[in-house]
């Protein structure tokens, strides 16, 4: 396992470099530059050109990439173009909010998705199975922005049960359990929107995988020994059906962070997703590159985590 982990970590280095080169090149090919979002009628064209020269925007693309990579290897993600703040500081200020949202959505996705998949498989071709199948197709198909706006309209505007946006109630001085309840009220809608597609996918994968396992000989042997249905399904069948679900488990980590861009923007959630949207609009290239690097590392971490969990779920798998 140690050799496997070391090999995967070494393989990730050229992959990360390739991703950063591709992202950097695409941004350079995009029309415009960050200075065009800072146009001031009082600033002359000569001053604008001088500012671009000082920021290194007139250098060849390979020089700009080399300078960026050199700073990254030293732990410096750069500085925002408009405010001059360290990019690392800006991102890590937003990270706790995104972790709270994506962590809640991640837990919801598997705590809800796996049991529903098991229930659907054990009631196959019956009314509950058909209902859950329709719900899963809706969950996969419905756009997150539409679902989010629908939840705001129903639960916030019509029923008044939940706040429309934000992370905490502005101006409130909650402490202890009251603060926890306030956080919970604010996170439940965006987390539900973010988790819905993953719940649907996990439920379908769990159902199909479990149905395949239930038809195998060792399950019939367990039934013949007189074991209860609960023991057969949960102890013998479910663990062997987890391989496809583990794949979703690993890949859902970057998927949730990517989906947070739209969800955080809809609910005005102060996380990295809304920061990414703002950075794209303002052409804050250093922030975009740092966020892309972070997401790429999450993708590789999710894949590695899934590979490690395969061996835990199936003793026949060895590295």
Image (cartoon, rainbow, N blue to C red):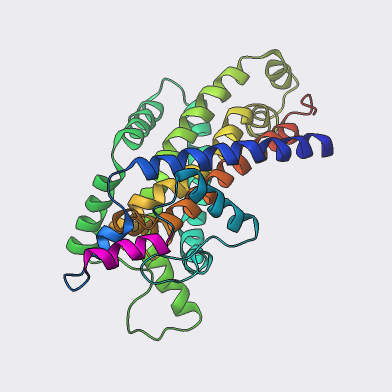
Instruction: Tell me if residue 128 comes above or below residue 34 in the rendering.
Output: above
Q: Can residue 87 be seen from the camera position used here? A: yes
Instruction: Tell me if residue 92 comes above or below residue 217 in the rendering.
Output: below
Q: Residue at x 64, y 37 (%)?
A: 14
**Residue 248 placement (x, y as % from top left):** 54, 35
188 left or right of 214? left
Q: Residue at x 37, y 52 (%)?
A: 261
263 left or right of 251? left
**Prevailing secondary structure class for the magenta stretch in the rendered image:** helix
Q: Residue at x 28, y 51 (%)?
A: 148
Which segment did they paint magenta? 44-55
Instruction: Tell me if residue 252 comes above or below residue 124 in the rendering.
Output: below
**Residue 126 placement (x, y as % from top left):** 40, 23
Q: Residue at x 68, y 16 (%)?
A: 220
Q: Quadrant of the N terminus?
A: top right
**Residue 118 placement (x, y as % from top left):** 53, 32
Does the magenta-highlighted stretch encompass residue 47? yes
């Amino acid at each position: 396992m140690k050799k496997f982990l070391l090999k995967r970590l070494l393989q990730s280095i050229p992959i990360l470099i390739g991703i950063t080169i591709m992202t950097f090149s695409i941004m350079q090919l995009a029309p415009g530059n960050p200075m065009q979002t800072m146009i001031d009628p009082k600033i002359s064209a000569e001053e604008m050109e001088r500012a671009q020269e000082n920021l290194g925007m007139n250098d060849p693309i390979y020089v700009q990439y080399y300078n960026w990579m050199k700073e990254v290897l030293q732990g410096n993600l750069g500085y925002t173009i408009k405010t001059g703040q360290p990019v690392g500081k800006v991102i890590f200020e937003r990270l706790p909010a995104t972790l709270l949202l994506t962590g809640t959505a991640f837990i919801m996705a598997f705590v809800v998705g796996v049991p529903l998949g098991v229930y659907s498989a054990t009631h196959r071709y019956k009314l509950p199975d058909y209902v859950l199948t329709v719900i899963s197709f809706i969950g996969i198909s419905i756009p997150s922005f539409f679902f989010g706006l629908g939840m705001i309209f129903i639960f916030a505007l019509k029923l008044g049960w939940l706040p429309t946006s934000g992370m905490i109630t502005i101006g409130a001085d909650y402490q202890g359990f009251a603060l926890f309840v306030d956080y919970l009220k604010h996170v439940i809608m965006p987390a539900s929107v973010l988790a819905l597609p993953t719940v649907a996918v996990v439920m379908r994968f769990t159902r199909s995988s479990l149905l395949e396992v239930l038809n195998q000989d060792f399950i019939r042997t367990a039934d013949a020994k007189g074991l209860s249905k609960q023991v057969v399904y949960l102890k013998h069948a479910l663990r062997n059906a987890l391989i496809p679900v583990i794949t979703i488990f690993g890949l859902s980590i970057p998927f949730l962070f990517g989906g947070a861009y739209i969800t955080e923007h809809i609910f005005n959630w102060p996380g990295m997703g809304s920061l990414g949207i703002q950075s794209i609009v303002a052409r804050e290239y250093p922030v975009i590159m740092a966020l892309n690097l972070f997401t790429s590392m999450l993708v590789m971490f999710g894949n590695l985590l899934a590979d490690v969990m395969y061996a835990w779920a199936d003793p026949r798998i060895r590295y």
